[in-house]
Image: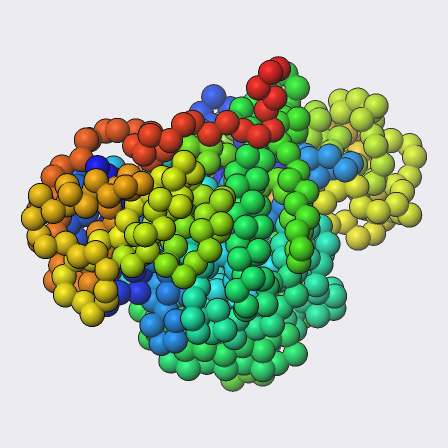
């Protein structure tokens, strides 16, 4: 049987705590030249798509704007459409909330991106509820948490109607809209739909409506369990297992030898987690001001504050059981003799493919062949050159092993994802 | 005399024209700026989103200023502000915003397309005009919400940004509020050029928040009323169309004469059928000064100070 092909997405390293800005090689996160360099590089590497995350309000910590991480990003759809003009093949996937957008304007914009890119648009639909982000929008905090997936489903269904072109009319719990769209039919029929929710409702919506899941389950065993769970939900909707691609997020560190790669990975983690960043992470769990603590010293003896409002706002990652998390972190720190910073480096890291280009390629391939993933959304730690080495050294190994395209065989994102 | 081009994103045949590098080079060489009217919720003929089309064009053009039309009453000012800021980053300072009041049946159609939503204006003239003024205020305040030097990348304090140089805008309007700051750093021009389309029947007071006004082909008589305030461009129709108003006869002499209309700083040439009219029009126009800098500089507008910086300090 032919080997499964690896799908590769490239996340632009912008507003994220894995983005390193203190390195001399770190360039602008906002200049279009950075986006262009990034896009041209991954297109040279025959990647399936570029991926942009979303955050519609600057992050805050202790009621103040968070200063330690990269902040400032372009409008997602605007920069993706600009990139469509300077690339030919690579897919363009943006994260856009169903909460602070409305179906007609957003579906029309996604249709425009699909049209101007010749069928390369993708939409990661996220469900960010809440007063925090709502403060920047006309409708404010309009959506109870329990209804966010209901609105998301109705939103996606309305968008699909609009993408077909011609008359549309939607009357549902969240929408009462009608009109006539002049843009359909689109090059891809509809932009590729990506979903990134973890909850049962999120997985179910992915199974019924999405083409791709962007997940956090990048380790082999956790990945296999997640993969089996989500693929197992598809039959209920009359969909084949291949209809939904599972792409966990991951980072990478390369070296000429295993030892060099490990050093590099450790170095990157130190850059990602500065002493002040370590305290900030800890504060997210402890929910207390810990600025008096030494990041190179032991964890606080006091327990998290479970009564107060969340001290950190605007992040996709949340810690729901603070006491249990704190207990677990203390155990790890005591067992292995870790300082606050070392502990944070250990527990907040996500999958980091580390090794020689050959070893990293083999590990990526293994995850895919063993059904822990259909591919990955990779995020480098540097902009704009974070993929230069990966494209020069890892991609050729994947190509030689027959698991990654040598050239684009299709012109649309759907065509890339279902090429085999 | 300055020359602008007035295009509509939904015009049939426009996209293949703009995809032609030769034609785009001719636009760069002859027009100071172009506007792309948006067909938001125009039944069956809404066409592509003008703001996105502008970004696509921005990445492929070199000189021309680009002002996409935006039906601000039916969109989120926050998204519009970051979208235009992004256009300014993509073009390195050639962006503007064409505020596009919808008229006739279109406000009701636009409202039907987004639904009856809290925080959005009722589709009647006074509410729309008031909302337009508020939307412009929010969009502009968000552009100033990052100081130019907000990104510090300071290894000593381990800070990427300085929160003292980022500002909540705390806008409180009649129907909605916006807190800020923007998620997009200040655009290269500080304030991209804000323009508005006015027709003969419009209240000139709407132009208060704009630096550039386009007077519809029948509205030239409003020009003297706008004197002293913003830059005024008069629309001139190109090619046959049933529309009344100023019309170009194809001669350079007539263009120069039209450019001397009282109160008018430039002309916006509006081709009736771009596929037929645009190439000959561009061939007949004199070249613009190349390399003239940002759109603000091209138009002779002063640099935009940031409202959050105390000049005295
Ligand atoms: C890998 C991953 C990436 C995500 N990226 C974003 C993002 O960029 N912006 C955002 O607002 N939410 C993001 N989310 C949040 C989710 O889309 C979703 O709203 C959130 O996980 C809550 O839904 P849940 O309870 O189903 O997990 C991400 C989630 C995951 C798992």
- Residue B76 placed where, x, y %? 55, 56
The residue sitting at 23% across, 66% down in the picture is B243
> Is the image coloured rainbow, by chain, by secondary structure, or in one colour?
rainbow
Q: Nearer the viewer, residue A134 or B219?
A: B219
Q: What quarter of the picture does the N terminus of chain B occupy?
A: top left
Any part of residue A224 in sight = no
Marks counted in the figure total 0
The residue sitting at 27% across, 57% down in the picture is B217
- Residue B255 placed where, x, y %? 14, 45
Relative to A373, is A200 above or below? below
Relative to residue A296, is residue B75 drawn left or right?
left
Relative to residue A55, is residue A275 drawn left or right?
right
Relative to A378, is A381 above or below? above
Q: Nearer the viewer, residue A330 or B11?
A: B11
Relative to A183, is A198 above or below? above
**Can you tell me which quadrant of the image ligand 1 is in?**
bottom right
The residue sitting at 83% across, 52% down in the picture is A321
- Residue A277 placed where, x, y %? 69, 30
- Residue A315 placed where, x, y %? 67, 46
Q: In terms of image quadrants, where is residue B33?
A: top left
Relative to residue A198, is residue B66 drawn left or right?
left
Any part of residue A172 in sight = yes
The residue sitting at 36% across, 39% down in the picture is B231
Q: What quarter of the picture does the C terminus of chain B occupy?
A: top right
């Amino acid at each position: 049987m032919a080997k499964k092909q690896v799908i590769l997405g490239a996340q632009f390293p912008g507003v994220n705590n894995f983005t390193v800005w203190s390195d001399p090689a770190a360039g602008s996160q906002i200049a279009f030249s950075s986006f262009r360099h990034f896009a041209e590089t991954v297109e040279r590497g025959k990647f399936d798509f570029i991926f942009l995350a979303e955050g519609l309000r600057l992050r805050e910590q202790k009621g103040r704007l968070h200063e330690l991480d990269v902040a400032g990003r372009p409008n997602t759809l605007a920069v993706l459409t600009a990139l469509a003009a300077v690339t030919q093949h690579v897919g363009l996937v943006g994260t856009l909330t169903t909460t602070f957008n409305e179906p007609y304007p957003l579906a029309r914009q996604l249709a425009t991106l699909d049209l101007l890119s010749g069928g390369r648009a993708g939409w990661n639909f996220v469900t960010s509820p809440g007063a925090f982000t709502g403060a920047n929008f006309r409708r404010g905090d309009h959506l109870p948490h329990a209804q966010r997936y209901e609105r998301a489903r109705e939103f996606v269904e309305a968008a699909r109607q609009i993408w077909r072109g011609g008359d549309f009319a939607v009357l549902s719990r969240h929408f009462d809209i009608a009109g006539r769209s002049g843009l359909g039919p689109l090059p891809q029929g509809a932009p590729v739909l990506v979903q990134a929710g973890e909850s049962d409702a999120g997985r179910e919506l992915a199974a019924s409506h999405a083409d791709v899941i962007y997940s956090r389950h990048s380790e082999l065993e956790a990945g296999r369990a997640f993969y089996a769970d989500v693929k197992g939900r598809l039959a209920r909707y009359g969909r084949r297992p291949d209809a939904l691609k599972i792409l966990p997020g991951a980072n990478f560190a390369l070296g000429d030898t295993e030892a060099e790669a490990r050093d590099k990975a450790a170095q990157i983690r130190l850059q990602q987690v500065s002493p002040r960043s370590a305290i900030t992470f800890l504060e997210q769990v402890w929910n207390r001001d810990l600025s008096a603590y030494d990041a190179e010293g032991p964890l606080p003896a006091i327990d998290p504050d479970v009564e107060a409002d969340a001290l950190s706002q605007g992040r996709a990652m949340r810690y729901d059981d603070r006491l249990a998390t704190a207990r677990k972190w203390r155990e790890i720190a005591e067992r292995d003799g870790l300082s606050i910073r070392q502990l944070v480096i250990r527990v907040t890291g996500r999958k980091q493919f580390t090794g020689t280009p050959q070893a990293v390629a083999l590990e990526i391939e293994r995850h895919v062949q063993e059904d822990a993933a259909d591919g990955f959304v990779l995020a480098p730690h540097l902009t704009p050159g974070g993929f230069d080495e990966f494209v020069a050294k890892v991609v050729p190994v994947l190509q030689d092993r027959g698991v990654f395209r040598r050239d684009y065989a299709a012109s649309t994102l759907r065509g890339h994802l279902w090429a085999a | 005399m300055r020359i602008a081009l007035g295009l509509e994103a939904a015009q049939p045949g426009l996209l293949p024209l703009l995809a032609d590098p030769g034609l785009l080079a001719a636009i760069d060489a002859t027009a100071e700026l172009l506007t792309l009217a948006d067909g938001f919720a125009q039944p069956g003929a809404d066409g592509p989103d003008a703001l996105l089309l502008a970004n696509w064009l921005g990445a492929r053009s070199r000189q021309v200023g680009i002002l996409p039309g935006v039906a601000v009453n039916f969109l989120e000012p926050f998204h519009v502000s970051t979208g235009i800021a992004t256009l300014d980053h993509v073009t390195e300072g050639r962006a503007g915003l064409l505020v596009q009041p919808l008229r006739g049946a279109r406000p009701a159609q636009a409202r039907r397309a987004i639904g009856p939503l809290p925080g959005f204006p009722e589709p009647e003239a006074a509410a729309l005009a008031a909302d337009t003024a508020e939307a412009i205020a929010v969009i502009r305040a968000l552009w100033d919400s990052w100081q130019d030097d907000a990104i510090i990348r300071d290894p000593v304090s381990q800070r990427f940004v300085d929160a003292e140089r980022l500002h909540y805008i705390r806008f409180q309007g009649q129907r909605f509020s916006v807190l800020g700051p923007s998620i997009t750093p200040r655009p290269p021009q500080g304030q991209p050029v804000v323009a508005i389309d006015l027709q003969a029947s419009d209240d000139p007071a709407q132009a208060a928040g704009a630096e550039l006004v386009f007077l519809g082909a029948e509205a030239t008589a409003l020009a003297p009323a706008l004197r002293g305030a913003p830059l005024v461009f008069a629309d001139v129709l190109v090619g046959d169309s049933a529309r009344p108003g100023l019309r170009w006869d194809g001669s350079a002499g007539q263009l120069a004469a039209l450019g001397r209309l009282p109160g008018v700083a430039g002309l916006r040439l509006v081709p009736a059928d771009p596929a037929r009219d645009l190439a000959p029009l561009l061939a007949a126009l004199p070249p613009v000064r190349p390399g003239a800098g940002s759109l603000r500089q091209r138009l002779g507008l002063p640099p935009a100070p940031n409202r959050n910086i105390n000049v005295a300090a």
